[in-house]
Amino acid sequence: MRQHLSMLREFSIPLLAGVVVTLVWANLAPEGYHHFNHDRIFGLFSVHFIVNDLFMVLFFGIAAAEITQSCLPGGDLHPVRKAINPLLATVGGVVGPVLVYLVLNEVIGEPSLRRGWGIPTATDIALAWLAASLVFGRRHPAISFLLLLAIADDAIGLAIIALFYPDPTVPAAPQWLVLVLIGMGAAALLRRQNVQNYWPYIILGGSLSWAGLFMAHLHPALALVFIVPFLPHPPRETKHVFEEDIHDRSPLAGFEHDWKVTVDFGLFMFGLANSGVQLTSIGHATWLVLASLVIGKTGGIFLMGLIGQRLGYPLPSKIGTKELALVGLIAGVGLTVALFVAGEAFTDPVIQGAAKMGALLSGGCALIAIIAGRLMRVRRMG
């Protein structure tokens, strides 16, 4: 049973199942799906609110844990020189899609679509890892390169959500952000008192942070991003991204270990709450998002990776131009975060549906990369 569950998580089956179920439901019974997603349960919260404003707190908290661990001595983003090339590629993978989106919007779009520029900036880490494993094998250096890039651009994606996508129907109330600062202060105090259990950090600091963001009309799903870095951890990291160190008993490792399975399977509900677009929901926003992910990500990562090499920050061994191009293409899989940002960027359901369709279609980057890898005869490792 444990092996079957691990396989389901490894191949992102919960998320993909949620997307497929929702697409069928939203197209066969759209009114029923809308009521399921947006009607309040017992007059309190809708499924959409529970998933996007509560469950996604854990999702982004796990992402923050991975970023924190990667930045520790011994981690994949430490020292800085070791991470220069993937970080430069990250810049290309963020700026490239934004430029493609804005330029194409001037040509085929309209002013109302400009707000969607942030949708194609992030990479779906889990699906990108799966595609890369099929293209390169699990021990190829391109895997670590891609995961570092994906984590870094997801960190940028978190900042973009926080800064540029407040609730457009309610004016921001930044004075409430003092609660976020108080939450961070509480977490810092707990760490100074050497509290070796993550629950006080999450309950006290996380609750204050969530309330501050919610009252400030910023997205509360980012609440734990400000708290997780304060969780005690070893002075040196001994594992790579998404590996698990069974000897690490720190609160940071404990939080990730205890909630990773819940998040992985909970992505079924994320797919259910965010993928409900009708197959006819194709418009200018669809092609803007899709082209930005496919062309902008691939081109930006490829170009900046080569520039980094010319500047004296080489690519990892066994990564040449064809491997770098494939990494860029795989990074164009923007499903999870792209769907999330699309829901925040647009309030018009027609435009939002078209943008989400572009995010869903970006999953095709994985299939194209797998085929291209075979045609290019990329050597698989492991």
Image: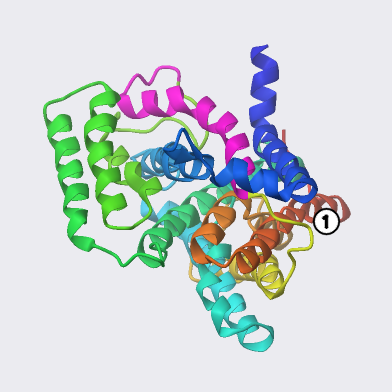
Residue 346 higher or lower than 65, as above or below: below
| Residue 232 in view of the camera | no
Looking at the image, how many numbered discs can be counted on the residues?
1
Mark 1 nearby-residue class (10 Å; few <14, some 14–19, many ≥20) = some
State which quarter of the image contains the C terminus: top right
Residue 67 % position (x, y): 41, 44
Q: Does the magenta portion include 190?
A: no
Residue 317 higher or lower than 8, as above or below: below
Q: Amino acid at mark 1?
A: Ala
Identify which residue, 120 or 92, lies in the foreground: 120
Residue 268 % position (x, y): 62, 35
Q: Residue furthest top?
A: 1
Residue 89, quarter of picture: bottom right
* Left or right of residue 95: residue 299: right
Residue 199 % position (x, y): 28, 24
Kindly identify the residue that appears in the image at 61 percent across and 84 percent down: 110
**Prevailing SS of the magenta stretch:** helix
State which quarter of the image contains the N terminus: top right
Kindly identify the residue that appears in the image at 58 percent across and 44 percent down: 37
Residue 189 higher or lower than 156, as above or below: above
Disc 1 designates what residue?
Answer: 372
Kindly identify the residue that appears in the image at 43 percent across and 53 percent down: 155
Q: Which residues are magenta?
A: 246-274
Identify which residue, 49 or 271, lies in the foreground: 49
* Left or right of residue 115: residue 219: left
